[in-house]
Image: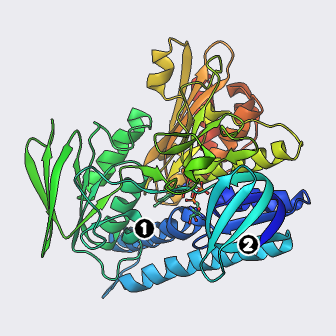
Amino acid sequence: MSQAEFDIVVIGGGPAGYAAAIRAGQLKKRVLCIEKESLGGTCLNWGCIPTKALLDDGAFIRKLRTNAAEHGVTVQGMQVDFAKLVSRSRGIAGKLSNGIASLFKKNSVQHIVGTGQLLEPGRVKIVGTNTPERIVIAEHVVLAVGARAAQLPGIAFDGKTIITSRQAMALPNQPKSIAIIGAGAIGCEFADFFNAVGSDVTLIEMLPTLLPNEDQEVSRLLKRTFESRKINVILGAKTEKSEAGANGVRIALSGPEGTPRTVEAELLLVAVGITANTEGLAAPAAGLELFKNRVKADHQYRTNLKSVWAIGDCISLHWPAESSMAGYRHPDLAHVAHHEAIYCIERICGHAQHEIDYRFIPGCTYTHPQVASMGMTETKAREGGRQIKIGKFPFSASGRALAAGEPAGFVKLIFDAKTGALLGAHMIGESVTELLAELVLARKLEATEAEIIESMHPHPTFSEAVMEAAGVADGRAIHL
Ligand code: FAD
């Protein structure tokens, strides 16, 4: 075994790992990134990006199928080439992954294709895919190994009829029917896509709403929209068991709305959460502390081991008890992983000591209509006993939305009644994922509803709905 020396070794090349490695390179550190698969991790290869390519194709198809006549267009003999959609999505993922390799070169990041294992603080073993096993020595080690789809107890993935999101986005053929367990962002996005391309979709959720973490008004509108498109939405239903057969899968459900019933489909996609890739990540002798299979990290991304740090989807965050963020769950999102990476590396390098405010993490779901939110829901704000002001502006009153033929949805903003501070933003409608950054910035700069109203929004844009919603909260909206 050979030995090498680095300032920082990063294990994992997803949004957490590659951003950490690039930032370390920018700060002139000798840095190595070990990645066992493709650079870009889940996000670029099997998550954020390829799903959005599929969803945009789905929206295009749906618009042609259902709205063309409204726009004065007659479409005849339309056919969908499912394999082409999948290959476009895979092509985009491949292109972006190659882009990370170029960024590594530009920033002098060394990269080894292989599996990294922490032997002890400062020593990492690499089992290379095409290279001999070796050990590298580093002053700091950053663990950024991400996560994979979690299984439901008793429902094992077989890759054929019971599949993960990864398999769902690279299917060789379009399924006639698909059942999806889990109506979080991933489950809802796949329901939207498969419905758009013409598969029969059943979406099953144990909790009483779609997107259970979202504002209830948003979840209700998404449910109504899905049902109007003939997606079979089953809420409050527990999956008891599933049996794969020659023609598909039978799923036995129980629960308030699903008492007891069976769903049959060609494929079953299980999208109920993730489990961290921590098996074998550290040699037992290293003594790395885990919590529920995730690497236990403090709010500055330190693990229990000296100079060993952890970021991204593989971590369980633990704040000091007195912190206002104590009790917040780690949001498993690419932009969170990215920001944790930057702050972790800057802390290691003694630069600015930023901290993320986990109470205001933006989150988006790219269904049609899209969903975007940040901060407290109305229910949470009221439960906390706060005096709040709510401003809600429907896209049906927006000239831009009407011109686009997209009048569904709304912007709902929640402000502290006394201070005018923005506590939460909840949006559903066309392009709302692009409106959210404005509200993240408003929150960061501690803008009040008055300052949002007084910031001139260009006309006609969807973004005017943000200004108008703030206006509704303050009793001075013009267009409602
Ligand atoms: P990952 O991206 O999982 O990267 C970890 C990397 O580490 C992997 O490449 C893995 O191969 C590698 N690795 C693991 N173990 C080792 C080892 N021992 N040695 C070497 N390499 C190792 N998030 C959003 O913000 N927006 C979205 O729209 C969105 N859509 C999603 C859609 C789907 C279907 C899925 C599954 C996820 C989606 N996510 C989305 C979540 C997002 O992909 C993750 O939050 C993000 O990828 C986490 O980044 P990470 O670097 O922590 O982990």
The alpha-carbon separation of the residues under discs 2 and 1 comes to 24 Å
Residue at the location (69% across, 16% down)? 419
Q: In the rendered image, which residue does mark 2 sit on?
A: 111
**Disc 2 on helix, strand or loop?**
strand
For the N terminus, give its image quadrant.
bottom right
Q: Nearer the viewer, residue 407 or 130?
A: 130
Q: Single out the residue that lies furthest toward the right.
A: 28
Local crowd size for mark 2, using a 10 Å CA cut-off: few (<14), some (14–19), many (≥20) = many
Mark 2 or mark 1: name the one nearer the start of the chain.
2
Query: Residue 129, image x and y in percent?
Result: 59, 79
Residue at the location (52% across, 53% down)? 278
Tag 1: amino acid: Arg
Q: Is residue 466 above or below residue 66?
A: above
Q: Say if disc 1 is inside 8 Å of ligand 1.
A: yes
- Give the quarter of the image for residue 423: top right
Residue at the location (48% across, 66% down)? 51
Q: Is residue 95 above or below residue 314?
A: below
**Disc 1 on helix, strand or loop?**
helix
